[in-house]
Amino acid sequence: MSPFSVFQGNCPRNVKKDAKYSVKSGVNDPIVGIIYETREDERWYVSTEDHPELVKMVNDVKTSLGQPPNGSFYINEYKQVIVPAVGTEKYYLAGTYERPLEFKFESKIISGEPVDLDGNPINPGDNWFGPHVGIPYVLCAGAKDIRYTTKPRPNVEKDIKLSNVIGKESAKSVAGKIRSCKGYEGGRFYVNEFCSIFAPIQADDEFKYIYIGKLNLQQWFPAPSQE
């Protein structure tokens, strides 16, 4: 039995290849990588060797489950590292990781901070230049609440709503910030480990990602238990 606990919080499911971190083989040791999709329709395969502790965290979970090392993982807004178990719907909590991930590629720096590729700060409403790695949430239709879905047991799904955590009026206020980008129809948006909020939108026949702002964890879902 794995010594790591099953993660009971918000787990990404069916995300695109560019919306996840991965551990993969490097020249000498395993490395952390992402796929970065540019607005010019290029895909950059970027990686860093600077996080051996994070690599070990992910691979310790994988090997404890009797699975080969390496593979995808995520870091949520509470800096919790969650690792999917291949062949199941379960995710496992590897622990927390405080060091920020940063990738260098062709003189550009890619990170989840709200900056462009030259390191200049961006503002809410600007194009999102960071990677698409993040934890997905849904702005409910009507833009008064935010939710995510869990699978507490086989054949069961449960919606977790922000209004049930911080109250309807507070949830409506938080949802209003997302509405400025997504509109009253709602839809999916993402939060990364830097507490940056960004969302995909369709505008003028163009699909793009927009920066919404920084998340206030004091008006958010509580950190999932690390028990």
Image (spheres, rainbow, N blue to C red):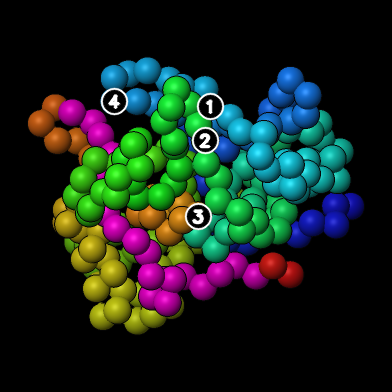
For label 1, the residue is: 46
For label 4, the residue is: 39
Q: Position of residue 123 (x, y in %)?
A: 23, 53
Give the farthest residue toward the right.
1
For label 3, the residue is: 193
Amino acid beneath label 4: Arg
Q: Closer to the N terminus: mark 3 or mark 4?
A: 4
Q: CA distance from mark 4 to mark 1?
A: 16 Å
Magenta stretch bounds: 206-225
Please give the count of numbered marks on the rendered protein. Answer: 4
Q: Residues within 10 Å of mark 4 (few under 14, many from 20)?
A: few
Q: Closer to the N terminus: mark 4 or mark 1?
A: 4
173 vs 215, nearest the viewer: 215
Q: CA distance from mark 4 to mark 2?
A: 18 Å
- Residue placed at 74% from the left, 70% from the top? 227
110 vs 5, nearest the viewer: 110
155 vs 113, nearest the viewer: 113
